[in-house]
Image (cartoon, rainbow, N blue to C red):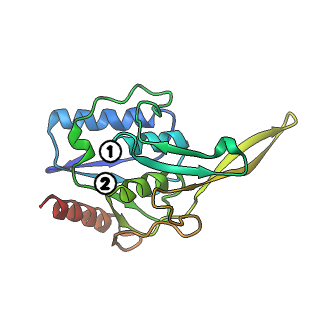
């Protein structure tokens, strides 16, 4: 979807093929008509796979920029994830070659109370690296990474394996991300109009 010189991309979740799909859509849109600004809609996106979130954020960041840091009781979960889209492409096709402008063009990320976990990782990474501004409502505030382990043959136990922190090391868990430009809850059209207006302002 495009609105004049601004591309609008809706990402509903972060799964095994999301990185390649997002890169492919952006590449196709750029080939049809290069755009000067971008809106990424993460409203009602509850997250998904950590690696997929890192991969999508990597598409818009300089190589090796910090995306997220994880910390837990076990040393194996203490990691710093750096921008590298190909490494975190998952099971999908390798990310399409995107133009260098994708790492510099004005960008807005839309968030709301349904934006959580992996979606918050992307939003926080892009804002903390000064790549995007956030428009919408305060996000959900889930900065934990869950793990599922089998118990016997029929049951599973789900537990918090680690917590994640954005590049700024700011608190996200149970607090959420505050938008740079706030919009009214439930006003879907008004929220999109505000996002487009903010990108246009950044394009001046």
Quadrant of the image occupied by residue 127:
bottom left
Which residue is drawn at the image coordinates 40% and 35% (left, top)? Answer: 85
Q: Residues within 10 Å of mark 1 (few under 14, many from 20)?
A: many
**Which image quarter is the N terminus in?**
top left
Which residue is drawn at the image coordinates 39% and 32% (left, top)? Answer: 20
Q: Residues under labels 1 and 2: Cα distance? A: 7 Å
Point out residue 51 in the picture as x, y percentages from the top left corner: 52, 39
Q: Where is 49 relative to 110, above or below?
A: above
Q: Is residue 104 left or right of residue 187?
A: left
Quadrant of the image occupied by residue 79:
top right
- State the mark number for residue 110: none
* Mark 1: secondary structure: loop
Which residue is drawn at the image coordinates 21% and 42% (left, top)? Answer: 101
For label 1, the residue is 60
Point out residue 19 in the picture as x, y percentages from the top left corner: 42, 36
Q: Are marks 1 and 2 in contact (CB under 8 Å)?
A: yes
**Which image quarter is the C terminus in?**
bottom left
Which residue is drawn at the image coordinates 34% and 72% (left, top)? Answer: 183
For label 2, the residue is 131
* Mark 2: secondary structure: loop
Q: Which numbered disc, 1 or 2, marks the residue that appears first in the sequence?
A: 1
Point out residue 197 in the picture as x, y percentages from the top left corner: 20, 65
Q: Where is 35 relative to 30, above or below?
A: below
Q: Is residue 20 left or right of residue 79?
A: left
Q: Where is 86 relative to 158, above or below?
A: above
Q: Where is 154 relative to 168, above or below?
A: above
């Amino acid at each position: 979807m495009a609105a004049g010189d601004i591309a609008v991309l809706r990402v509903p979740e972060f799964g095994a093929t999301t990185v390649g799909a997002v890169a492919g859509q952006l590449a196709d849109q750029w080939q049809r008509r290069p755009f000067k600004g971008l809106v990424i809609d993460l409203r009602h996106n509850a997250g998904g796979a950590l690696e997929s979130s890192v991969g999508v954020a990597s598409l818009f960041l300089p190589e090796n920029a910090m995306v997220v840091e994880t910390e837990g009781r076990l040393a194996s979960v203490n990691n710093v994830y750096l921008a590298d889209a190909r490494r975190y492409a998952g099971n999908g096709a390798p990310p399409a070659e995107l133009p260098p402008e994708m790492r510099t063009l004005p960008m807005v990320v839309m968030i709301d109370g349904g934006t959580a976990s992996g979606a918050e990782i992307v939003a926080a990474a892009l804002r903390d690296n000064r790549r995007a501004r956030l428009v919408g409502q305060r996000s959900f505030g889930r900065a934990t990474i869950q793990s599922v382990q089998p118990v016997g043959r029929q049951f599973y136990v789900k537990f918090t394996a680690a917590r994640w922190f954005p590049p700024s090391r700011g608190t996200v868990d149970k607090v959420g991300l505050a938008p740079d430009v706030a919009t009214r809850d439930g006003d879907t059209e008004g929220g999109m109009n505000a996002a487009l207006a903010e990108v246009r302002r950044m394009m001046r």
